[in-house]
Amino acid sequence: MGVLKTLWSKLKQAILALKPGRVTLGYPFTPREPEEGFRGLPRVDVNRCIGCGGCAEVCPARCIRVVDTDQTTRVLCFLHERCTFCGRCAEVCPVNAIEMTKEFELSTDDPHEDLVGEYHIWMGPCERCGRCFEAPSALDRLKRTGMRCDEIDAKCAIACPAGVEADSEETKS
Amino acid sequence: MTAEQVTQGLRERIGDALLESEPRGDRRVYMTIDPAEVVAAADELFNKMGGRYVITAATDRREKHGSFLVTHFFSFDDDDLYVILHANVPEDDPRIASITPTIPGAGWAEREMQDLLGVEAVGHPDPRRLVLPDDWPTGVFPLRTDFSSQDKPEASMEGAPQMTAIPEGAVVVPIGPYFPTQHEPESFAVFVDGEVVVGSDYRGFYNHRGIEKLGSSDLTYNQIPFIAERICGICGFVHSCAYCMAVEEAAGIEVPRRADYIRTIFLELERLHSHMLWTGVAGHIIGYDTLFMQTWRMREPLMWLAEQLSGNRKTYGMNIVGGVRRDVDKKDFPKIEKVLADIEREWTALQEAVPGDRTLTARLGNVGVITPEEVRELCSLGPVARGSGDTVDIRVDHPYAAYDELEVSKCVEDGCDTLARTFVRLRETPVAISIIRQCLEQMPEGEIRAEITEEIPPGLQGIAAVEAPRGESFHWVLTGEENRPERWRVRAPTYSNLQAVSTMINGDVLADVPIDIGSLDPCYSCTDRMTVIDRRSGQMRVMTREEMRNSRNR
Ligand code: SF4
Ligand code: SF4
């Protein structure tokens, strides 16, 4: 009886295994696109980014470094090696400058070289303190090439070592 | 047991030592007791009232309160009640009586408390080091607030634990730190007499990543869910979910109903893929690779579905405090239904075919036996408990997310062996499918995320339990300053289940040990949560650091 039962079971298993046929994919020789909405490597559009640093603030892996290299350049440095592909950076970016691309083939033997995304953002410097300041949008940034101090962002004023108060009401929006 | 009855009972037992009892709704009661009476209180809750011991947490509150907070958590599953038992232990004498002699299942949690916070559990039957690596110096406690997450103390071998005494005439067979059928590092020393297992010792926590420390020192409330999701490589969503729910409970954040449903869908998708994965792995361990290949083939479309819905096949990244980040759109429903229908069809065929196979019944039946009494004492959870007739299923007993509106049938077996645990998982798979279908049908329209405008005030507490594929996953959050918790305690189900291994394998033959351990669906990383390289310690032979280095270079 036991033998019959096992045979019967094996037969059913054979059907289960044979029915779907061959399922192995030709990957990597046949490329396979990830699904729509997939969160792959984040990439920044430097023309949109206003350098607010919001992405660095929320990143759970702490893999975005923001450094001002001079008065007009802010560098966003993504250490993709540590990225968790959560997409929080893209979610909070006020100007939608970050796209979660479909890139996922990131294996490398040199992550420090290959998995670093460096973006140079052009910033308008504050006339009073001389440091990079964040314009509310990319368009505003253009407008501010004249560095008019009466339009200084409230945030910058708080951090301003010269202690100059900006008219925060006007620029808060 | 209602909150009042529990309070009443405790008051009768320990009198004025019950300093405070504050029910919060019908489902939680927070109590503070005099630490001197902790054993009596634990005995009353566990032995007299029949509560289930959940976990112990210790918190360093010396800076503000001059004490350590030791908390034991209990659950009354028939009455949907969690009891939180706080005791303040003075900082100058950080000692509290051990409850392990009363509740064997508390053994690890108390050892962890000694290791990480330096609060001594007086009278613990086995106070050896558990979590910290062998070369961690004595007297340095990483979860104390004066220890920075960046500190790297000088190595010292003083505190390395010794292996338990080997029974007379027995031989040690090491399973691990790396072993073919165990997919993560862990180390069992199995003592055998001939072929028969007569005892064992466990040394794990090789994957401890200090997540709890990060949560209370580096991360912010909304960064933690993504790190929490990485506690487990298979069922991570339960952790991010439980964490978010704990914070939401603490801060009183109302989660939109739709978000609850979406969470439920993902929790069940995760259970599906986890059980299918396990079935395959179990087959693989006993050399039944057809099962492995076929279940994993069936599982793959599920992973792709998750990728479509959430953006990633496994780390969904959906949870955030207050709700979820992505909606499940109506236009995706047909896809979901198609995948579920395919899996259901094939799973039914598998369920009909496999149990008749002698390979399975011969290898799984009557091995890894754990009796209902042992389940209760060792506080085992999930399919391990349900395979031994225990009926606890958090989805039904302590409903969370959308489970209060869904029909969930409990799958309980009474074989008490590895085969019974297998059946529990085989049967839970179609149940998960039915739950997802119910969700799709009943899901209300609306927001998916609550707007949180105010900062979460410090000093609030919340707990959350989620029925992970492996059992109850439990989180406790004590809110703190600077936008992060003061303490976040995680208890993965494997933490409880692993403590039952030595009981399960005793008396089995050596060849059955891998599948016995496998039958827990063990997840060492969940259990471990920091990593530092370890050495094998023991009376038999001690591998020095140099030897390790040499063997690596060879
Ligand atoms: S995807 Fe997540 S982890 Fe990666 S950079 Fe963005 S926020 Fe950081
Ligand atoms: S604009 Fe967007 S990408 Fe640029 S710093 Fe702010 S959040 Fe980051």
Image (cartoon, rainbow, N blue to C red):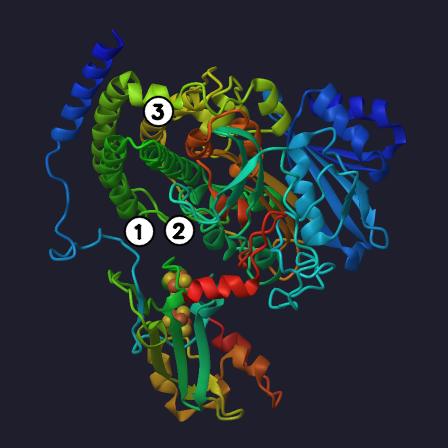
According to the image, label 2 marks what residue?
B317
Residue in view at x 86 percent, y 55 percent: B92
Tags 2 and 1 touching, CB below 8 Å:
yes
Decide: is B167 above or below B151.
above
Quick check: A64 left or right of B485?
A: left
Q: The residue under label 1 is which amino acid type?
A: Gly
- Same-chain status of marks 2 and 1: yes
The answer to whether residue B441 is visible is yes
Whether label 2 lies within 8 Å of ligand 1 gets the answer: no
Q: Quadrant of the N terminus of chain B?
A: top right
- Identify the chain of the residue marked 1, using the numbered disc in the image: B
- Quick one: label 2 or label 1, which is nearer the N terminus? 1
Helix, strand or loop for disc 2:
loop
**Is B40 in front, or is B287?**
B287
Q: Dot 1, crowdedness within 10 Å: few (<14), some or many (≥20)?
A: many
How far apart, in angstroms, are the residues tagged by discs 2 and 1? 8 Å
Q: Quadrant of the C terminus of chain B?
A: bottom left
According to the image, label 1 marks what residue?
B311
How far apart, in angstroms, are the residues tagged by discs 3 and 1? 28 Å
Residue in view at x 81 percent, y 28 percent: B40
Q: Looking at this view, name the residue that lies furthest to the right.
A: B16
Q: The residue under label 3 is which amino acid type?
A: Leu
Quick check: B487 left or right of B342?
A: right
